Amino acid sequence: DSGVTQTPKHLITATGQRVTLRCSPRSGDLSVYWYQQSLDQGLQFLIQYYNGEERAKGNILERFSAQQFPDLHSELNLSSLELGDSALYFCASSVSRGNEKLFFGSGTQLSVL
Amino acid sequence: AQKITQTQPGMFVQEKEAVTLDCTYDTSDQSYGLFWYKQPSSGEMIFLIYQGSYDEQNATEGRYSLNFQKARKSANLVISASQLGDSAMYFCAMRETPYSGAGSYQLTFGKGTKLSVIP
């Protein structure tokens, strides 16, 4: 168990809908990262929050947004969903003070029908 | 150009044998980190091993070792005494200097290698 909790584990929705994915980082970790894993694109970095502030952006679509709350949990919001958004979405956390590893949650499998 | 290249889409290894999974990387940074993660069929990403660019010795974690050849920009994962439970996808990843500012340590991943351990 990595200590990173993601909910829900599975999500099935329809095109055009909006969903929210939730992540609780490991105790003491200040950074939360969101990754998208799909068969064609592999693992893609989406966005990072550090202690409540956005720190880095990757290949995140404008339809997607995220935030990190004062208790350090994070939410990834996906709107106007398309079939191509179907993927495994990972949250990872780290202390972000040096060359430490990222701890990944078990992911949320999103299926857009 | 890809930053992380894993040239072996799939590998087979006999149980109890050793196997090497290849990874080459591309960076102009002097300070960077290299990681290997395992993803079993259940989907979670499991950290295996880390090598810093300034580490003089190859990293080892139990049955996992990282064959780090800096001049060749190579960071191969060696799994000794393979077990059936080692069957999974293996991802090599790199963390470069955080140009996004302090506290930014996102990883860039390769496409992965699917390892199958044969009884």
Image (cartoon, coloured by chain):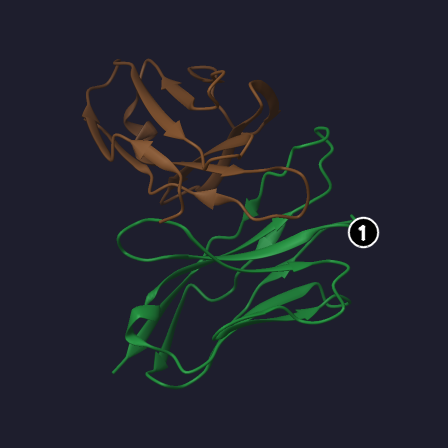
B66 above or below B111? below
**Quadrant of the image for the C terminus of chain B?**
bottom left
Q: Which residue is mark 1?
A: B30
Q: Residue furthest front?
A: A28
Chain coloured green: B
Instruction: Name the image quarter holding residue A12.
Output: top left
Three-letter amino acid code at the position of disc 1: Gln
Residue B85 in view in this figure: yes
Picture coordinates of residue A81, whole percent (x, y) = 30, 19
Q: Residue at x 34, y 84 (%)?
A: B14
Along the horizontal axis of the image, is A58 left or right of A108?
A: right
Choose between B2 and B59: the one closer to the eye: B59
Instruction: Name the image quarter holding residue A14.
Output: top left
Instruction: Name the image quarter holding residue A15.
Output: top left
Crowd rating for badge 1 (residues with CA inside 10 Å; few <14, some 14–19, many 20+) = few
Picture coordinates of residue B114, whole percent (x, y) = 37, 64
Choose between B20 and A75: the one closer to the eye: A75
Q: Is disc 1 placed on a helix, strand or loop?
A: loop
B3 above or below B64? above
Along the horizontal axis of the image, is B69 left or right of B4?
A: right
Picture coordinates of residue A45, whole percent (x, y) = 51, 35
Q: Residue at x 27, y 56 (%)?
A: B41
Number of labels in the image equals 1
Q: Residue at x 48, y 15 (%)?
A: A62
Along the horizontal axis of the image, is B32 left or right of B66?
A: right
Chain coloured brown: A
Residue B2 in view in this figure: no
Choose between B5 and B99: the one closer to the eye: B99
Picture coordinates of residue A1, whole percent (x, y) = 35, 49
B45 above or below B78? above
